[in-house]
């Protein structure tokens, strides 16, 4: 077996910035939303409606961000994204009106696309396409702790600080921790680029034949979009939903199992998953997510059912994150990777943008059980699309790992 030289320093640095990026820009929102609603005089549904609009705008920007990463480098984009994240978190904290708050949340999602997985995966592909698939697994293993760390931290901080003060703390983390690490990765990339003048970098060929790439792009984008909707709807309401089902204060602790479950799935994949192709990983992730949602719908407020739900959801989400990075590389190769993943992220985020608001409205008007089963059905469609992709791809000319 060929030995791969994983860029450990870059993976570790990106792992830390992903924990902070996802924790401060995404996972904390559901915990802080009630405080935002009370402070701004809005209903909780409207706060999530603003969040949904911001996800939609963030999705629209993903294609542009992906193309820009191919032109100037992913680390450059991530550096600028850290600065924008800090600035928009501070703007949210200061916002004197609903209009300013909504504008800040929109910019926050644009910044998220510049610093989260889409950009981090592109940075790893730029660093070394031959080891990128393996590096993505290591990165998602580290970043899986984001929810485990930031859900409890956010909940604890609400006892001492207002949501505005918490966002100022989060702004400092993005500016003082993430931005310097992204600058360092950018400098490492410049040194590597100079070395490649002497020894050109290898590329990875895709598994799809040229005439099937368009269809493959459509199927994969739709599949990730449907799973993205299913997952985004649940994650945006995880702790409040479990609380509403009667789990009380245990909801935070149960929800915190999501992170370790993500890490466990990535650890298992890292050790035993080399025999599974990226399409197979995508199918497995979708099955686990749908199973978790269905189990919660069936078990209701049962504590064992809630635990199984969170574990299944975490396992599926953990593998799904790997698939988002490795499946495009497997199918389409490393050339133009940023633009390809940008298009996929745009579809996923644009469709998933409505998830927090739609799911919140469905729970309010139809009940949690009906909302969960409807959500699971969308995931089933995603499974079928991933199966269609798997049957249309051939073995890759050049191995991605």
Image (cartoon, rainbow, N blue to C red):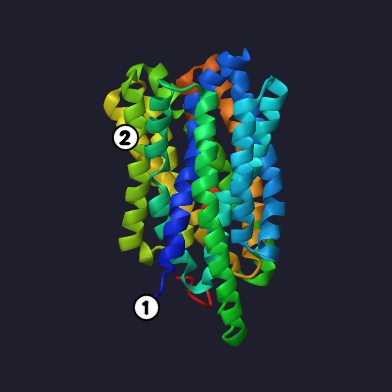
Residue 282 appears in the figure: no
Q: Is residue 83 left or right of residue 5?
A: right
Q: Nearer the viewer, residue 329 or 197?
A: 197
Residue 127 appears in the figure: yes
Name the disc covering residue 3, or none: 1
Q: Nearer the viewer, residue 20 or 137?
A: 20
- The quarter of the picture where residue 120 lies is bottom right
Instruction: Tell me how many marks there are.
Output: 2
Name the disc covering residue 62, or none: none
Tag 2 near tag 1, CB within 8 Å:
no
Packing grade of label 2 (10 A; few <14, some 14-19, many >=20) is some
Disc 2 versus disc 1: distance between alpha carbons?
A: 37 Å
From the top left corner, tell me how far across and down residue 241 is, in percent.
44, 23
From the top left corner, tell me how far across and down residue 361 is, in percent.
58, 20
Q: Is residue 258 left or right of residue 29?
A: left
Q: Secondary structure at mark 1?
A: loop
Q: Secondary structure at mark 2?
A: helix
Q: At 59% across and 71% down in the image, what residue appears?
A: 190
Q: At 56% across and 20% down in the image, what residue appears?
A: 36
If you read the primary sequence from the N terminus, does the residue marked by circle 2 or circle 1 appear first? 1
Q: At 38% across and 44% down in the image, what residue appears?
A: 145
Q: In the displayed structure, would residue 122 be above or below residue 178?
A: below
What residue is disc 2 on? 308
From the top left corner, tell me how far across and down residue 65 is, in percent.
68, 53
Q: Quadrant of the N terminus?
A: bottom left
Q: In the displayed structure, would residue 70 be above or below residue 168?
A: below
Q: At 52% across and 64% down in the image, what residue appears?
A: 124
From the top left corner, tell me how far across and down residue 232 is, in percent.
53, 36
Packing grade of label 1 (10 A; few <14, some 14-19, many >=20) is few
Residue most toward the left? Answer: 304
């Amino acid at each position: 077996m060929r030995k791969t030289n994983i860029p450990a320093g870059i993976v570790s640095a990106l792992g830390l910035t992903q924990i902070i990026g996802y924790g401060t820009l995404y996972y904390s929102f559901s915990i802080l939303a009630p405080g935002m609603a009370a402070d701004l005089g809005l209903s909780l549904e409207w706060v999530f409606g603003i969040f949904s609009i911001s996800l939609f705008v963030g999705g629209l920007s993903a294609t542009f961000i992906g193309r820009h990463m191919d032109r100037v480098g992913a680390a450059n984009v991530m550096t600028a994204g850290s600065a924008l994240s800090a600035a928009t978190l501070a703007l949210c904290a200061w916002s004197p009106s609903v209009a300013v708050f909504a504008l800040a949340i929109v910019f926050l999602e644009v910044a998220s696309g510049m610093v989260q997985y889409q950009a981090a995966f592109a940075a790893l592909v730029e660093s070394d396409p031959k080891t990128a698939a393996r590096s993505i697994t290591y990165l998602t293993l580290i970043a899986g702790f984001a929810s485990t760390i930031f859900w409890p931290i956010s909940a604890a901080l609400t006892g001492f600080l207002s949501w505005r003060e918490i966002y100022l703390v989060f702004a400092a983390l993005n500016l003082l921790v993430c931005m310097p690490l992204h600058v360092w990765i950018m400098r490492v990339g410049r040194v590597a680029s100079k070395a490649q003048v002497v020894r050109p970098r290898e590329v990875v060929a895709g598994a799809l034949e040229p005439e099937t790439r368009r269809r493959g792009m459509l199927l994969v984008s739709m599949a990730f979009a449907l799973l993205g909707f299913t997952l985004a709807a649940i994650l945006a309401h995880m702790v409040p939903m479990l609380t509403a089902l009667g789990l009380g204060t245990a909801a935070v602790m149960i929800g915190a199992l999501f992170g370790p479950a993500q890490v466990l799935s990535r650890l298992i994949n890292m050790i035993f998953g080399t025999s599974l192709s990226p399409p197979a990983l995508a199918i497995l992730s979708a099955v686990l997510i749908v199973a978790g949602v269905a189990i919660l719908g069936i078990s209701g407020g049962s504590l064992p059912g809630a635990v199984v739900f969170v574990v299944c959801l975490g396992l599926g989400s953990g593998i799904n994150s790997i698939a988002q990075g490795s499946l495009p590389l497997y199918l389409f190769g490393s050339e133009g990777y940023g633009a390809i993943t940008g298009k996929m992220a745009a579809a996923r985020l644009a469709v998933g943008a409505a998830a927090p608001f739609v799911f919140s409205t469905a729970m309010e008007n139809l009940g949690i059980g009906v909302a969960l089963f409807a959500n699971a059905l969308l995931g089933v469609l995603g499974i079928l699309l991933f199966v269609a992709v798997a049957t249309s791809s051939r073995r890759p000319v050049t191995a991605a790992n």
